[in-house]
Image (cartoon, rainbow, N blue to C red):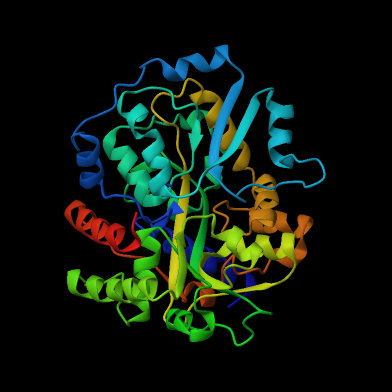
C-alpha cells in the first residue's frame, strides 16, 4: 500500500471513528454529563416537545451589526501570550470587518446548559452567536428547537469537512451543526510526581495517589471509562447492572478520599497547582499544559481503550448575527487556518487539507496522533452506544447523586 493510500484510509477511518462518536462526549456542551433531556426539562418545568419561539428574522439582522460573539471551552483556540490575543481570530476580524468577541464560558455541558436554557426556551438572545456543544448536547439542542438552521451558501469551505462527517445521526446534512474539533478522553499523570505512570483506569486507585486524583464531572466521559476498565464494550449491549457496578467503583473512591475532586475543564488548574497529579482528562488539554507549563505530564489511552468525541459549531435560536457566525465558521474551515488552530489546541482536526497545511506551520505535528490519528491510534478509542431518553435520565440522576452535584 502506498503512503498516499495509507493516509487516505486513515482519514476515512478517522471520519468513521468521529461519526461513530456522535452520541458521546465531553462536557457543555464537550462530551458527557448533564441532565438527560427529559430529566432536565422536567426540572425546568418544560415539555420535551416544546420548541423555542425565537425571532423569525434573527438571521436577517446580521447586516445591521458587524459583530459575532463566540462562547467556547478553555484552551480551545490559538492564543499568543505576548499580545494576549487570538491570532487567527484577529485575522478573521481584519479580513471580514466583523468584530469577534470571544469568551471561554464553557466548563461543562451541565453548567453551561443550566445558564442558558431558560433564555433559549423563550427564544431570547443569550449573548452568544456561536456555541460549541458536544455531540450529545448538540442533539438535545436540535431536538428542543434551540438552534438556527445554517445557510451553507455562507459557508463555502464546508466542502472541506471530512466526508464521513457530512451527515451525522443527530443532524443529517449538517443543517444545524458543524464539527469544531474532536478529541480523546484518556489518562494523564505528572511524570515527576508519579514516575511509574498509568496503564489503566484502575491504576488511579493506587494508594500513592490518594487525594490527588481528578475525574470528569461529565457522566458520558467518566462512566464509559470506568465501564471500559471493567471489560465492558460501551459501544455494545450493556445496561443498568453494568452501569451500577462501575458507579459503585466511583462512589467508593470518592468516599474513601482517593478522588480529590470531580470537575469539568477546571481540572487543569489542579494539575498546574500540583493538588492533583493524575486523572481522567481530555487529550488536547495535556498537550497544551505541557507547552505552557513545562513538559510535566503524560497522556495515554488506557489498555482497555479510551473515548473519542466531537464538539460542534451551533447558532443559538435568539442570535441576531447568524450570517456573521456562518462567515466565522467558513473562515475556520480554511485548511491553513484549521492547521494553525490545530497546532495550538492539539485536538483532532476535521478539515480536509489541514494535514498538508501543517507541514508549513509545524512539520513536527504532521504525524501527531492526537491531531491526525493513525489507524493504530484510532484502534485505542471507542464511543458509547446511543442511550434512550429514559436511560439517560436514569443514569444521569444516579451519577449526579454519587458526585454530589
Whether residue 335 appears in this view of the structure is: yes
| Image location (x, y in percent) of residue 294 | 75, 67
| Residue drawn where x is 27% and y is 39% of the image | 143
Q: On the rendered image, what quadrant is the C terminus found in? A: bottom left
Looking at the rendered image, the quarter that the N terminus falls into is bottom right
Residue at 68 percent across and 45 percent down: it is 337
- In this rendered view, identify the residue nearer to me: 30 or 324: 30
The total number of labels drawn is 0
Across and down, in percent, residue 222 comes to 39, 66
Instruction: State left or right for residue 210 relative to residue 55.
Output: right
Residue placed at 58% from the left, 83% from the top? Answer: 197
Extreme residue toward the top, this view: 64
Q: Position of residue 315 (x, y in %)?
A: 45, 32
Residue 393 in the figure: left or right of residue 266: left
Residue 10, above or below 15: below
Q: Residue furthest front?
A: 256
Q: Is residue 43 left or right of residue 54?
A: left
**Whether residue 307 is situated above or below residue 203 in the rendered picture:** above
- Provide residue 151's location: percent of width, then percent of height: 45, 29
Vertical position of residue 207 compared to residue 318: above or below: below
Q: Is residue 386 visible?
A: no
In-front residue for pair 21/151 = 21
Residue 115's quadrant in the figure? top left
403 or 331: which is nearer to us? 403
Q: Residue furthest bottom?
A: 196
Amino acid at each position: 500500500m502506498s503512503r498516499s493510500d495509507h493516509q487516505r484510509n486513515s482519514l476515512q477511518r478517522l471520519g468513521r471513528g468521529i461519526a461513530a462518536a456522535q452520541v458521546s462526549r465531553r462536557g457543555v456542551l464537550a462530551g458527557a454529563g448533564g441532565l438527560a433531556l427529559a430529566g432536565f426539562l422536567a426540572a425546568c418545568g418544560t415539555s420535551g416537545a416544546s420548541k423555542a419561539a425565537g425571532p423569525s428574522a434573527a438571521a436577517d439582522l446580521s447586516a445591521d451589526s458587524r459583530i459575532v460573539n463566540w462562547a467556547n471551552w478553555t484552551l480551545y483556540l490559538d492564543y499568543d501570550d505576548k499580545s494576549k490575543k487570538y491570532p487567527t481570530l484577529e485575522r478573521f476580524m481584519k479580513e471580514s470587518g466583523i468584530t469577534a468577541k470571544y469568551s471561554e464560558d464553557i466548563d461543562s455541558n451541565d453548567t453551561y446548559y443550566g445558564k442558558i436554557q431558560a433564555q433559549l426556551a423563550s427564544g431570547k438572545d443569550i449573548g452568544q452567536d456561536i456555541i460549541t456543544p458536544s455531540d450529545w448536547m448538540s442533539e438535545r439542542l436540535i431536538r428542543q428547537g434551540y438552534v438556527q438552521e445554517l445557510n451553507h451558501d455562507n459557508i463555502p469551505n464546508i466542502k472541506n469537512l471530512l466526508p464521513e462527517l457530512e451527515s451525522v445521526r443527530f443532524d443529517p446534512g449538517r443543517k444545524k451543526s458543524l464539527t469544531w474539533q474532536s478529541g480523546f478522553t484518556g489518562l494523564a499523570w505528572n511524570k515527576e510526581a508519579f514516575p511509574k505512570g498509568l496503564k489503566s483506569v484502575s491504576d488511579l486507585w493506587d494508594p500513592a495517589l490518594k487525594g490527588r486524583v481528578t475525574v470528569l464531572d461529565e457522566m458520558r466521559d467518566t462512566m464509559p471509562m470506568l465501564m471500559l476498565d471493567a471489560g465492558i464494550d460501551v459501544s455494545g449491549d450493556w445496561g443498568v447492572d453494568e452501569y451500577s457496578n462501575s458507579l459503585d467503583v466511583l462512589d467508593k473512591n470518592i468516599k474513601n478520599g482517593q478522588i480529590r475532586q470531580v470537575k469539568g475543564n477546571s481540572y487543569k488548574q489542579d494539575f498546574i497547582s500540583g493538588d492533583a497529579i493524575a486523572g481522567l482528562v481530555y487529550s488536547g488539554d495535556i498537550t497544551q499544559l505541557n507547552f505552557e507549563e513545562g513538559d510535566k505530564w503524560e497522556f495515554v489511552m488506557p489498555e482497555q481503550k479510551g473515548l473519542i468525541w466531537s464538539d460542534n459549531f451551533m447558532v443559538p435560536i435568539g442570535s441576531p448575527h447568524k450570517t456573521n457566525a456562518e462567515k466565522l465558521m467558513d473562515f475556520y474551515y480554511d485548511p491553513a487556518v484549521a492547521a494553525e488552530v490545530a497546532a495550538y489546541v492539539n485536538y483532532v482536526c476535521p478539515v480536509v487539507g489541514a494535514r498538508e497545511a501543517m507541514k508549513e506551520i509545524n512539520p513536527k505535528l504532521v504525524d501527531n496522533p492526537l491531531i491526525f490519528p493513525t489507524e493504530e491510534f484510532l484502534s485505542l478509542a471507542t464511543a458509547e452506544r446511543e442511550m434512550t431518553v429514559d436511560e439517560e435520565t436514569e443514569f444521569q440522576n444516579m451519577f449526579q447523586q454519587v458526585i454530589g452535584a
